[in-house]
Image (cartoon, grey):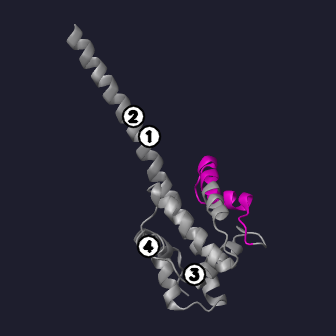
Amino acid sequence: MLEFKMAAATKWWTLVAAFILSLCVNRATPSVEIMKKLTTGFATALDNCKTELNVQENIMQDFYNFWREDYELLNRDTGCVIMCMALKFDLIDEDAKLHHKNAHEFAKTHGADDDLAKQLVTMIHECEKTITEADDCIRTLEIAKCFRTKIHGLKWAPSMETVLEEVMTEVKPS
């Protein structure tokens, strides 16, 4: 009888552990999907900003490699383009500070639930508070790098191949 109870308890704990693990996996996978959607949505402004700012190919390389953890983002102009893109979606105010409500809504319109949207806005805000650079473009670049590090820490970074495929399918031939 004792063996039966121990076997039942072991099966019970195995079931509980499997359930908890599935919750963790299911939480991470949608977050990667959301980050892919957010990246793709944000990238829709890239063409406009590219034209407006007369962006060179080396800056475009930064965007192609943005989610690569080992890729160094060093160019001030990349920060200027990110700021331009954020302005297109009203994600920052005239002082180049995060507009929390608009950023929250942007995340939600790209598939994030309320909690995930809050978490993303909080992460960006935390990064924003740690960067004291006066130059808006460099400051924006540093905030983006900080955010990228936080997303990688959560294992939510989308693969750039997937993001590029998504962007290319949305581009309509002229």
Q: Amino acid at mark 1?
A: Leu
For discs 2 and 4, the disc positioned in front in the rendered view = 2
Residue 117 is marked as: none
Q: Position of residue 39 (x, y in %)?
A: 54, 68
Residue 156 drawn above or below residue 79 = above
Q: CA distance from mark 3 to mark 4?
A: 22 Å
- Image quadrant assignment for residue 18: top left
Task: Give the residue pinned by disc 2.
Answer: 19
Q: CA distance from mark 3 to mark 2?
A: 43 Å
Name the N-terminal-most of marks 3 and 1: 1
Residue 78 is marked as: 3
Residue interval drawn in magenta: 96-121
Task: Give the residue pinned by disc 1.
Answer: 23
Name the N-terminal-most of marks 3 and 4: 3
Q: CA distance from mark 2 to mark 4?
A: 33 Å
User: In the image, what residue occupies the spot 41% across and 36% down?
Assistant: 20
Q: Is residue 12 left or right of residue 30?
A: left
For discs 4 and 1, the disc positioned in front in the rendered view = 1
Residue 174 drawn above or below residue 25 = below
Q: Within 10 Å of the Cα at label 3, are there few (<14), some (14-19), or many (20+) other Cα atoms?
A: many
Q: Secondary structure at mark 2?
A: helix
Do the CB atoms of the residues marked 2 and 1 lie less than 8 Å apart? yes
Report if residue 40 lies within the magenta region: no
